[in-house]
Image: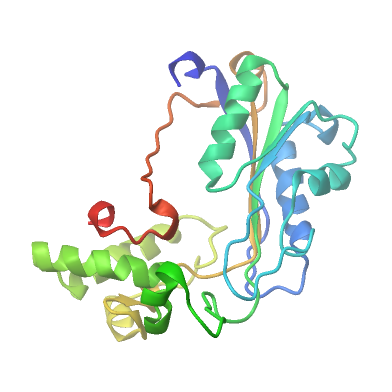
Amino acid sequence: MDEFSGRAAIVGLGYSKLERRSPRPLAHFAREAAEAAVADAGLTVDDIDGLGTIPNIAAYGNTGDLEGIDIVTVPNMARMLGRERGIRWHVQTPGLCPDTIMTAAAAVASGACTYALVWRAVNVPKGRYSDFSRAKAYGDDQFRAPYGFTMPAAWQSVALRKYMHDHGSTREDMAAFVVQNRENTQLNPKAYWHGTPLTAQDYLDAPMVADPFCLYDCDIPVDGCVAVVLADAERARSLRNPPAYITGHAQTTWPTRGGFTDSEHMW
């Protein structure tokens, strides 16, 4: 990352509304966030010549892969913005949003494109968030699926239980952490939980999902999108907003990361 440190910046940020089980197709959320990010940067869609996203689905079971309904790919966004012929660089990366942002940072810093728009749009339809629907389980699943060990809350609950055992932590300690997070949410008017406080007793009384993980330890599935615009450092200095320079990036993984179930690395 050293060769690109400080050579790219985020210059625009846009959010869509966050809605739970929305009847609107995901493309509406993506376009709303994209246009807001471009406007925030003081640009027009005609200035955008780079596109990047993470189109993989967010949930399991009920989520489909219909273009514009469940996912929003680069071709879909290009059509919505009227930029089918104006894109010089694009990428669709699997995994997490930082991967695409860092790839876009390298693109604008190297001159592959002038302004890159990166978005993440998520659709979580009504239904079970993590559902193993097959009649038989094979491979590693035979040791997980029969016991409900098929969702992130279950995987992480094992690590949390080990942490609590080793350090003497309690659910009351977790309550303090979660309540503080909800208080922080009140500082962001765009947050889904803005205006809805949470008490420690609310947390302790919440339904258990995977002991010791309760309902309020988990994220809430919502439909929405966030987008950013990136530019190289020189152009960023001449735009509307103070640039948020990208100076570094780091991440890690391990060979069996796929299911987050490798105890050696989780603990």
In which quadrant of the rendered image does the N terminus lie?
A: top left
Left or right of residue 113, residue 148 in this image: left
Left or right of residue 222, residue 141 in this image: left
| Displayed quadrant of residue 211 | bottom left
Colouring scheme, one of rainbow, by chain, secondary structure, one colour: rainbow
State the residue at coordinates (73%, 37%): 38
Left or right of residue 1, residue 31 in this image: right
Q: Is there any visible trace of residue 179 in the rendered image?
A: no
| Displayed quadrant of residue 20 | bottom right
Q: Position of residue 208 (x, y in %)?
A: 34, 83
In which quadrant of the rendered image does the C terminus lie?
A: bottom left
Q: Is 10 above or below relative to 166?
A: above
Q: Is 256 above or below relative to 57?
A: above
Q: Is there any visible trace of residue 116 in the rendered image?
A: yes
Q: Is 67 above or below relative to 94?
A: below
State the residue at coordinates (26%, 69%): 158
Q: Nearer the viewer, residue 83 or 245?
A: 83
Q: Nearer the viewer, residue 128 or 253?
A: 253
Q: Is 73 above or below relative to 163?
A: above
Q: Nearer the viewer, residue 264 or 30?
A: 264
Q: How many numbered marks does the figure carry?
A: 0
Q: Nearer the viewer, residue 209 or 12?
A: 209
Q: Position of residue 253 (x, y in %)?
A: 38, 43
State the residue at coordinates (18%, 66%): 162
Q: Position of residue 13 (x, y in %)?
A: 63, 41
